[in-house]
Each structure stands twice: as structure tokens, then as C-alpha cells.
Amino acid sequence: MIQPGAESDRIDVNEPAACATWAKKLSSTEDPLRDAVAAVGDRAAEVEMHLQGSRSTTNADRVREAGGS
């Protein structure tokens, strides 16, 4: 259940009911969902893209991955 003032596009993996609901919505299980939130943050759209393996990267992301500054 979304709390008053809470953002509906955010995933709270510390709330068991919310975690279970988002895992079901995103066709995942809770462990990969938690891993995705740890990797990309708690915005549902980013988590969904990460779980699908298609997270878009920015040029800055690519530079960091390549070992640049």
C-alpha cells in the first residue's frame, strides 16, 4: 500500500509487502529485485530495465566502466 506522500514509482525493498508486490509486477523474485535496486537505485523504471538487461548507459557510465575518470 502506498503511503501518503510516497512516490509510487519507487521500490522499497525494506518493506516485505512492497518488495513482493514489485517482484510480481516485474516478473522477478525478491533477491534479483533487491540486487537491481542496489545496482541502479529504487526507481521502478530503472529497476525494470536492469532486470531486463537493457539498462541504458550514458557516456559518463561508459567512461567509468572503461577505467577513465
Image (cartoon, grey):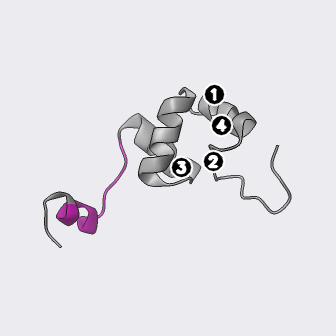
Above or below: residue 68 compared with residue 42: below
Does dot 1 land on a helix, a strand or a loop? helix
The amino acid type of the residue labelled 3 equals: Ala
Image position, residue 39 (x, y; %): 41, 49
- The answer to which of marks 2 and 1 sits earlier in the sequence is 2
Residue labelled with disc 1: 24
Q: Residue at x 64, y 53 (%)?
A: 10
Could you give the CA–CA distance between mark 1 and mark 3, rounded to whole angstroms?
A: 14 Å
Residue labelled with disc 3: 45
Residue labelled with disc 2: 11
Q: Is residue 58 left or right of residue 25?
A: left
- The answer to which of marks 2 and 4 sits earlier in the sequence is 2
The amino acid type of the residue labelled 1 equals: Lys
Q: Do tag 3 and tag 4 residues touch (Cβ < 8 Å)?
A: no
Q: Residue at x 67, y 31 (%)?
A: 20
Q: Do tag 3 and tag 2 residues touch (Cβ < 8 Å)?
A: no
Question: Which image quarter is the N terminus in?
Answer: top right
- The answer to which of marks 1 and 3 sits earlier in the sequence is 1
Could you give the CA–CA distance between mark 2 and mark 4, rounded to whole angstroms?
A: 7 Å
Could you give the CA–CA distance between mark 3 and mark 4, rounded to whole angstroms?
A: 15 Å
Crowd rating for badge 1 (residues with CA inside 10 Å; few <14, some 14–19, many 20+): few
Q: Which of marks 3 and 2 is in front?
A: 2
Q: In this view, does 21 lie to the left or right of 5?
A: left
Q: Residue at x 26, y 68 (%)?
A: 60
